[in-house]
Amino acid sequence: MNTKEKIIYESLRLFSTKGFNAISVRDIAKAVGIKASSLYNHFKNKQDIFDTIIRRYSDSINNFLLSIKIESDIDGITLNNLKWTDDQIFAKSLDLFRFCLQDEYMIKFRKLLTIEQFNNSKMADLYNKLFIDDILNFQSKIFESLMNSNILIKKDPYTLALQFYSPVFLLFYKCDSIKHKELTLLKKHIADFKDMYTLKG
C-alpha cells in the first residue's frame, strides 16, 4: 500500500469511528506515520480526502455491480433489458447485500455517513441517497420488471421495495453494531419474501 492509499485507508478508519469533524489532518498524518505537511503532497485538504473516499465508494459499488451484471453510475443504479429469472434476481440481491455487509470498505463508509448525517445536511442527503433512495429505486425497477413479466404479484413496486429492503437495512445496523456477519437471517428473509410474492402456478 503506497502513502496515498494509506492516507485514504486511515482517514476512512478514523472518520468512521470519530466522525469527519473530530479528525484533523494531523491525526491522519500520525496514523499514517508521516508529517502533516507531507500529506499535502497527496491531497489539498481534509475535504479532498473525503471526496476521494466518496469516489472510492462509487467505484467499489460500480465494480461489484458490474461483476454481477448490473449497470450503475454515480447517479444511481440502472437496469437495461432485464432478462433474469426470479431465482437469479433474488440470488443477485443476496450477493449485493452480502457485499454491503461484509466488505470492509463498505462497512466503514456506511459507519462514516451514519455518524456524519447528524452533523451535516449534505452528509445526511448523501446517506439517504446512497443507502436508501438509490437502493429503493433500484429494487422498485426490478420488482416492476418482474410484475410486468407475471413473475411477481402485482403491487405498488416502491411499497414492495420498502417491504423487501427495510429488514435488510435493519440487519446492516445489527451487523455493524455487534460485528455479527451471520447471513442466515438475510437468506431466510429473501427466501420468505420470494415465496410470499411470487405468483404460483
Image (tube, grey):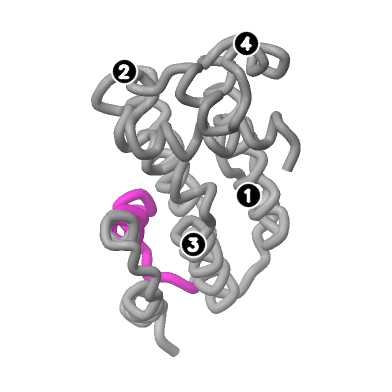
Give the residue at the far bottom of this rendering.
201
Q: Amino acid at mark 4?
A: Ser
Quadrant containing the C terminus in the rendered view:
bottom left
Residue at the spot 40% in from the left edge and 38% down from the top edge = 16
The tag on residue 102 is 3
Q: What segment carries the magenta color?
A: 151-166
The tag on residue 79 is 1
Q: Callout 3 environment at 10 Å: few (<14), some (14 to 19), or many (20+)?
A: some
Give the residue at the far right of this rendering.
2
The tag on residue 158 is none
User: Could you tell me which secondary element the residue under label 4 belongs to?
Assistant: helix
Percent coordinates x, y for residue 145 in the rendering: 53, 59
Q: Amino acid at mark 2?
A: Ser
**In magenta segment, residue 138:** no
| Residue position for label 4 | 37
Pointer 4 or 2: first along the chain: 4
Q: Is residue 178 above or below residue 4?
A: below
Quadrant containing the N terminus in the rendered view:
top right
Marks 4 and 1: which is nearer the front? 4
Pointer 3 or 1: first along the chain: 1
Q: Callout 2 environment at 10 Å: few (<14), some (14 to 19), or many (20+)?
A: few
